[in-house]
Image (cartoon, grey):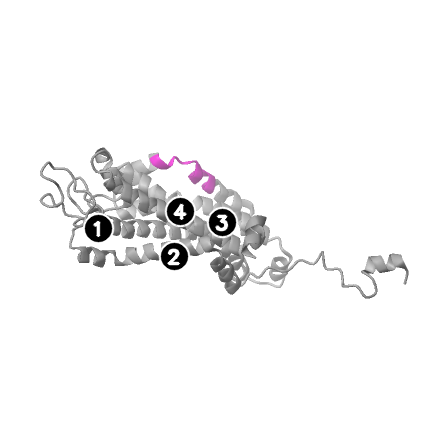
Amino acid sequence: MTTAEDAVRGGPLGPPRTELVRPRQERTSRAVLRRLLHDRTSVAALCVIGVLTVLALAAPALVELTGRSALEPDRQHGLTAAGVPVGPGAEFWLGTDFVGRDVFSRILLGTTNTFMIAIVSAVAAILIGTVIGTLAGLYGGIVDVVLSAVIDFVVALPFLVIAMAVVVIHGASVGVLMITIAFFSWSTVARMVRSLVLTIRELDYITATTTLGASDARIIVRHILPNIAGPVLTYGSLLIPQIIVMEASLSFLGLGVPPPAPTWGGMIAENQSNYAIAWWSILFPGIALLVSTLSFNLLGDGLRDALEPGSRPARRRRKDR
């Protein structure tokens, strides 16, 4: 064997050339969970979300344990002789609001209401968007044209104007709020799913499955949904904080859950005129909003990195090693 041949083949005793062989990333549920738990930021965000979820589920019982009503005004104990809200202390841990209600108890119940609105609205938006996006991407043609036009129409609607009109016609309630938020959230999901399905349906194994006579339902359930589950789940974790902010914005404008039922955005709106004398009634609900939205966003970023390890910045990949 000549020297030139040895150089090409790596030498007679040299190691095989492996620089072009890339390790296949594991995409199983166990591998994704392992990568997610390896990210300290994601773990911290997941712990915070877990604590908030427990608080949301146990809020009524915890409010009973505090002995302070979150709904009924307590002007005798919750306000000073001058009618000023009581500040944080041993009696009221986070102070009281403008009518003497315990801020801590209202934040607890607000966690329940805010999480219920955010999760139900997000699930509804994801289900609607996934169905419409899958149909548009899979069938194409006139179906895609019509559904894409509907998606574009919903995207073009002014959110606040329509929300105000709905509240004026039907009145403010939790159900109306969730339906309104879900209606304005599904279109983005549908766009993403349609783009994914358009790519997946052109793959060889989808073409082979169709040629073998597989039904559309089987293709969707067995091949399309498992392939889009990761991106949809990631977007869902990022959609929840967006909905929390949307609910807070509507509540701040008086279009949210009617009082005295508390939400974090509603608490900020109710006490905005008293920020100079009762800053705690705005600060602590604002902190709850900040912590929850930040945690969901960080978890969404970590979940995206766990599902697609190659998309992480090189600096983070070196840190993980």
Distance of mark 2 from mark 4, alpha carbons? 13 Å
Question: At 16% across and 52% down in the image, what residue appears?
Answer: 68
| Residue 133 numbered tag | 3
- Three-letter amino acid code at disc 3? Gly
Mark 3 lies on a secondary structure that is helix
Distance of mark 1 from mark 3, alpha carbons? 42 Å
| Residue 47 numbered tag | 2
Distance of mark 2 from mark 3, alpha carbons? 33 Å
Q: Where is mark 4, residue-wise?
A: 294
Q: Main secondary structure of the magenta part?
A: helix
Distance of mark 1 from mark 4, alpha carbons? 22 Å
Mark 4 lies on a secondary structure that is helix
Q: Where is mark 1, residue-wise?
A: 105
Q: Nearer the viewer, mark 2 or mark 3?
A: 2
> What are the residue bounds of the magenta stretch?
150-160
- Three-letter amino acid code at disc 1? Ser
- Three-letter amino acid code at disc 4? Leu
Closer to the chain start, of discs 1 and 4, is 1
2 and 3 marks in contact (CB < 8 Å): no
Q: Give yes or no for residue 310 being in the magenta stretch.
A: no
Examine the rendered structure and indicate whether residue 240 appears above or below residue 204.
above
1 and 2 marks in contact (CB < 8 Å): no
Question: At 28% across and 44% down in the image, what residue appears?
Answer: 285
Q: How far from the left and from the top, in percent, is residue 95?
A: 20, 45
Q: Nearer the viewer, mark 1 or mark 3?
A: 1
Q: Residues within 10 Å of mark 3 (few under 14, many from 20)?
A: many
- Res. 23 in view: yes
Q: How far from the left and from the top, in percent, is residue 171?
A: 24, 41
